């Protein structure tokens, strides 16, 4: 009896030491939406009074105390622009929600629906207040025509996987360029700066400043291996140093030679914007050397296919249904904090940790640091892989004002339905991450390989300690073309984080 009690205590001690007491509540579910999509893309942000969630292509706000939905039903995101007379923002997916902590405003962004003929617009909406329940709430809406280039068939490249972030001098945007005539192959990227100052003032915004890689955008692109840039998004209320460049990170995938499965590099991109003299703006890339990794689900035979995460359900051939790990890229966010004596940036992605034919995946995280205005460099990194049973994938990471990191992610295995977990640890003391379950899944996807493309971890701007995380799961199997996913929002804080 004593030995059993000791085992229980040893298991629980890390949770006690971490002081986590997760609270979770239901976010938007497919049953609430007129036209839900297979690709959920759940993300959101915590503000001063509400949590704002996105699932394709709808938004809903929740009171941060009662967790009750603010609106009687989720709002179709495109309606926000349509109500202001903007016709080109029929957003169908890939939306992102931010809370601009430096301005205490809400930000929603996304591109218009896919069309092989284009043209493509990026649409951004910024709230007039931090309170989404305010009767005076107004959305300042803008549309920016994207120059995505064209292929040799004169079809525009599709601006996929757009990500935005709030910085002091601009809202920054990145997106991939996909060739519709080559099965939507990645052929390059664009990074852009939007006029945050005038957008916040509801004034006429200066033209968006953009850079591409390759430059110029090619007519016949080849596979691009450092795609899906993530711009740094300010956490906390301490702005970057005056004049500080915005930074982006991206993966460096293994070279395409039919045999290489590993990489030892990421990419750091620095964007300097000059609104007064645009020709002085610059966008530069430098490699970051990291511990060797194999992207999640990566195989040389199908380098662009990252589908390998198993679920318990079996298909007619007796094989487990599998879903996409989205292991070919870093995952948002690139969480930035200015601690005064140093700047810290966190990001994460899915890596392969299994041996031989075992494709098991885990979470790899990185912290970049910089002092005195220097270029950020890799300071530390690690894996979240506490066992050899579960696949961990699609992470999102952030840190509180005491330097504690928390990463949320999906889990699945041949015996465990897809669910939601998080791990947290101190970046200063560097103990082993403590994993906590946030939501057990009860069903599998059988009619799609899609599980969503990203999730979102953010930190409460009021106490600067409480983490808020959103992800999706299933209460029952999704079969026969049905769409019945659910989302769950979690909040938790570490005992070591006190005072702001």
Image (spheres, helix red, strand yellow):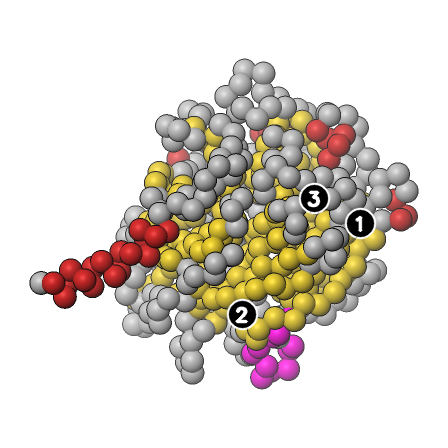
SS label for mark 3 = loop
Q: Are marks 2 and 3 in contact (CB under 8 Å)?
A: no
Residue 304 in the figure: left or right of residue 202 = left
Report whether residue 437 is seen: no
Question: Decide: marks 3, 1 in contact (CB < 8 A)?
Answer: no
Mark 2 vs mark 1: in front: 1
**Image quadrant where one finds the N terminus:** bottom left
Horizontal and vertical percent position of residue 399: 52, 49
Span colored in magenta: 255-265
391 magenta-colored? no
Residue 272: give its label.
1
On residue 240, the disc is 3
For marks 2 and 3, give the one nearer the viewer.
Answer: 3
- Find residue 267 and report its image quarter: bottom right
- Mark carried by residue 295: 2
Q: CA distance from mark 3 to mark 1?
A: 13 Å
Tell whether 379 sits left or right of 316. right
Give the Cα separation between the discs numbered 2 and 3.
31 Å
SS type, badge 2:
loop
Choose between 427 and 95: the one closer to the eye. 427
Res 154 quadrant in image: bottom right
Mark nearest the camera among 3 and 1 is 3
């Amino acid at each position: 009896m004593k030995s059993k009690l000791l085992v229980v205590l040893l298991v629980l001690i890390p949770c006690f030491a971490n002081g986590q007491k997760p609270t979770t509540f239901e976010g938007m579910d497919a049953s609430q939406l007129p036209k839900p999509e297979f690709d959920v893309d759940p993300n959101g942000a915590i503000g001063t009074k509400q949590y704002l969630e996105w699932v394709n292509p709808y938004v809903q706000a929740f009171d941060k105390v009662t967790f009750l939905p603010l609106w009687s039903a989720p709002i179709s995101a495109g309606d926000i622009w349509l109500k202001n007379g903007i016709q080109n923002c029929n957003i169908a997916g890939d939306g992102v929600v931010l809370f601009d902590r430096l301005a205490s405003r809400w930000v929603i962004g996304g591109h218009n629906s896919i069309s092989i003929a284009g043209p493509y617009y990026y649409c951004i909406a910024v709230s007039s207040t931090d309170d989404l329940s305010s009767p005076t709430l107004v959305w300042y809406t803008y549309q920016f025509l994207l120059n995505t280039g064209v292929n040799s068939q004169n079809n525009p490249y599709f601006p996929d996987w757009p990500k935005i972030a709030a910085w002091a001098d601009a809202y920054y945007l990145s997106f991939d360029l996909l060739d519709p005539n080559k099965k939507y192959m990645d052929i390059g990227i664009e990074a852009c700066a939007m006029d945050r100052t005038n957008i916040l003032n509801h004034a006429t915004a200066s033209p968006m400043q953009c850079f591409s890689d390759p430059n110029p955008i090619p007519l016949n692109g080849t596979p691009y291996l450092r795609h899906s840039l993530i711009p740094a998004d300010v956490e906390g209320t301490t702005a970057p140093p005056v004049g500080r460049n915005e930074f982006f990170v991206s993966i460096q995938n293994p070279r395409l030679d039919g045999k290489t499965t590993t990489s030892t590099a990421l990419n750091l991109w620095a964007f300097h914007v000059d609104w007064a003299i645009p020709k002085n703006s610059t966008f530069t890339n430098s490699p970051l050397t990291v511990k060797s990794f194999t992207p999640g689900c990566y195989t040389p035979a199908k380098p662009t296919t990252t589908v390998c995460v198993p679920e318990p359900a079996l298909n007619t051939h007796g094989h487990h249904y599998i879903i996409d790990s989205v292991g070919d890229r870093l995952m948002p966010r690139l969480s930035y904090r200015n601690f005064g004596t140093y700047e810290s940036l966190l990001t994460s992605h899915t890596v392969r940790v299994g041996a031989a034919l075992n494709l098991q995946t885990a979470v790899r995280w990185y912290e970049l640091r910089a002092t005195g205005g220097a270029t950020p460099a890799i300071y530390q990194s690690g894996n979240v892989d506490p066992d050899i049973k579960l696949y961990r994938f699609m992470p999102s990471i952030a840190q509180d004002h005491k330097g504690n990191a928390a990463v949320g992610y999906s889990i699945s295995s041949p015996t465990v339905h897809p669910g939601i977990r998080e791990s947290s640890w101190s970046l200063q003391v560097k103990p082993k991450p403590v994993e906590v379950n946030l939501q057990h899944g009860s069903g599998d996807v059988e009619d799609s390989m899609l599980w969503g493309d990203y999730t979102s971890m953010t930190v409460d701007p009021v106490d600067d300690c409480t983490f808020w995380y959103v992800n999706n799961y299933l209460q029952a199997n999704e079969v026969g073309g049905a769409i019945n996913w659910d989302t769950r929002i979690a909040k938790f804080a570490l005992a070591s984080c006190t005072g702001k």
